[in-house]
Image (spheres, rainbow, N blue to C red):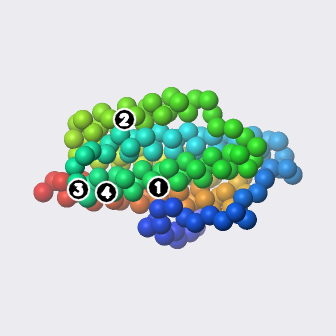
């Protein structure tokens, strides 16, 4: 599949009121079921990701914390992307998202207690899983073009996070 080029330095892409619309009216129910499952999955996983970063942030004034804050903001943007799409399709978020919120808290807090390398390794591990999950959902669901573009942009952001955390990990080996 041909990947689009996305500017991953943009943390919160601009959204205008005219971009919002109700979706799904003329889509067959089988396709809608896949879209619902995919959006709920993405929304739930982004809930976890935002919490991981939120609970990895320490009080230290350093570049890692600055980048963790930017990553948290970016994950919150992804969370909003999928929440908006859920409501545009007249769906609701999964009730299981509280479990993923808790898992995000646990992974973020425990990795913070274990130190910088644990923060970075946890973040790389989670983001690699996210990229793989995004790819499965992109391949397995027939998305509308606007939603597909958002998912691809968010996947590119996750790949950028992996590269950023790998670079920090390399620096920490010095």
Q: Residue at x 58, y 66 (%)?
A: 14
* SS assignment at label 3: loop
Of the image marks 2 and 4, the number of the one nearer the N terminus? 4
Q: Within 10 angstroms of label 3, few (less than 14), some, or many (20 or more) residues?
A: few
Q: Residues within 10 Å of mark 2 (few under 14, many from 20)?
A: many
Q: What whole-number distance in Å separates the C-alpha atoms at marks 2 and 3?
A: 21 Å
Instruction: List the residue tagged with mark 4.
Output: 66
SS of the residue at dot 2?
A: helix
Say whether marks 2 and 4 touch (CB < 8 Å).
Answer: no
What residue lies at 36% left-to-right and 35% top-to-bottom?
107
Q: Nearer the viewer, mark 1 or mark 2?
A: 1
**Rendered residue at 41%/60% (across/down):** 160
Q: Earlier in the sequence, mark 1 or mark 2?
A: 1
> Which numbered marker is on residue 107?
2
* Dot placed on the residue nearer the N-terminal end, 2 or 3: 3
Marks 3 and 4 close (CB-CB < 8 Å): yes
SS assignment at label 4: helix
Point out residue 122 in the picture as x, y percentages from the top left corner. Answer: 33, 42
Q: Is residue 55 left or right of residue 140?
A: left
Q: Earlier in the sequence, mark 4 or mark 1?
A: 4
Say which mark, if any, is on residue 62: 3
Camera-side residue of 155 and 87: 87
- Between tags 2 and 4, which lies in front? 4
The residue shown at (35%, 59%) is: 163
What distance separates the C-alpha of mark 3 from that of mark 4? Answer: 7 Å
Task: Relative to 51, say whether 5 is above or below.
Answer: below
Q: Quadrant of the N terminus?
A: bottom right
């Amino acid at each position: 599949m041909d990947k689009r080029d996305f500017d991953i330095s943009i943390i919160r892409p601009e959204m205008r009121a005219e971009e919002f619309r109700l979706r799904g009216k003329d889509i067959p129910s089988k396709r809608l079921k896949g879209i619902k499952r995919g959006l709920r999955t993405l929304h739930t996983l982004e809930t976890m990701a935002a919490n991981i970063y939120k609970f990895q942030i320490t009080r230290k004034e350093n570049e890692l914390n600055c980048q963790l804050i930017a990553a948290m903001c970016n994950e919150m943007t992804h969370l909003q992307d999928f929440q908006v799409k859920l409501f545009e399709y007249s769906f609701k978020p999964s009730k299981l998202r509280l479990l993923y919120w808790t898992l995000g808290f646990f992974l973020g807090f425990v990795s913070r207690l274990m130190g910088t390398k644990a923060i970075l390794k946890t973040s790389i591990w989670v983001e690699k899983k996210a990229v793989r999950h995004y790819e499965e959902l992109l391949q397995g669901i027939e998305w509308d073009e606007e939603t597909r573009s958002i998912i691809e942009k968010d996947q590119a952001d996750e790949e950028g996070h992996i590269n950023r955390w790998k670079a920090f990990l390399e620096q920490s080996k010095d």
